[in-house]
Image (cartoon, rainbow, N blue to C red):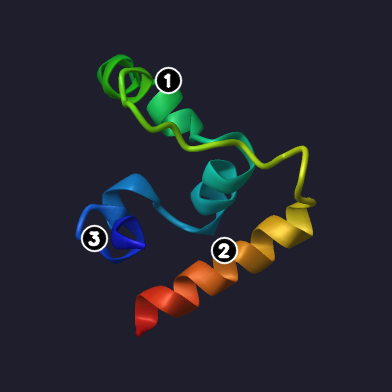
């Protein structure tokens, strides 16, 4: 939960489309295509799991809406 409330969240997730990418793919094209960002992401101890096999795009949208709701509080 701290990542959702953290000040770096707006830098990690820029908009609903990127949020959906994080949820479904475990990352975003913006970070994957950036050599420096990829260097750090690939070396993290904890990786964001991809939920594409478990969630539909609609489910990912619902999860994203819930995250946005939590961030407003």
Instruction: Give above or below for 7 relative to 26.
Output: below
Residue at 66% across, 62% down: 61
**Residue at 28% across / 49% down in the picture?**
11
User: For the point 39% across and 29% down, which residue is it?
Assistant: 31
x then y, percent, for residue 6: 24, 60
Mark 1 lies on a secondary structure that is loop
Label whose residue precedes the other's in the sequence (2 or 1): 1
2 and 1 marks in contact (CB < 8 Å): no
Q: CA distance from mark 1 to mark 3?
A: 24 Å
Dot 1: within a 10 Å radius of its alpha carbon, few (fewer than 14), some, or many (20 or more) residues?
Answer: few
33 or 27, which is in the foreground? Answer: 27
Q: x, y (%) of residue 64? A: 57, 63
Q: Which residue is mark 3?
A: 6
Of tags 2 and 1, which is closer to the observer? 2
Marks 1 and 3 close (CB-CB < 8 Å):
no
**Which quarter of the figure is the N terminus placed in?**
bottom left
Residue at the spot of label 1: 33
Expressed as whole percent of the image width and height from the top left, the position of residue 58 reads 77, 60
Q: Earlier in the sequence, mark 2 or mark 3?
A: 3
* Furthest residue toward bottom: 73
- Which residue does the numbered mark 2 point to in the structure image? 64
């Amino acid at each position: 939960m701290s990542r959702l409330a953290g000040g770096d969240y707006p830098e990690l997730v820029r908009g609903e489309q990127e949020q959906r990418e994080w949820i479904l793919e475990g990352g975003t094209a913006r970070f994957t295509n950036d050599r420096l960002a990829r260097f750090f992401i690939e070396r993290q101890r904890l990786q964001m799991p991809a939920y594409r096999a478990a969630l539909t795009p609609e489910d990912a949208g619902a999860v994203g809406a819930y995250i946005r709701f939590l961030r407003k509080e």
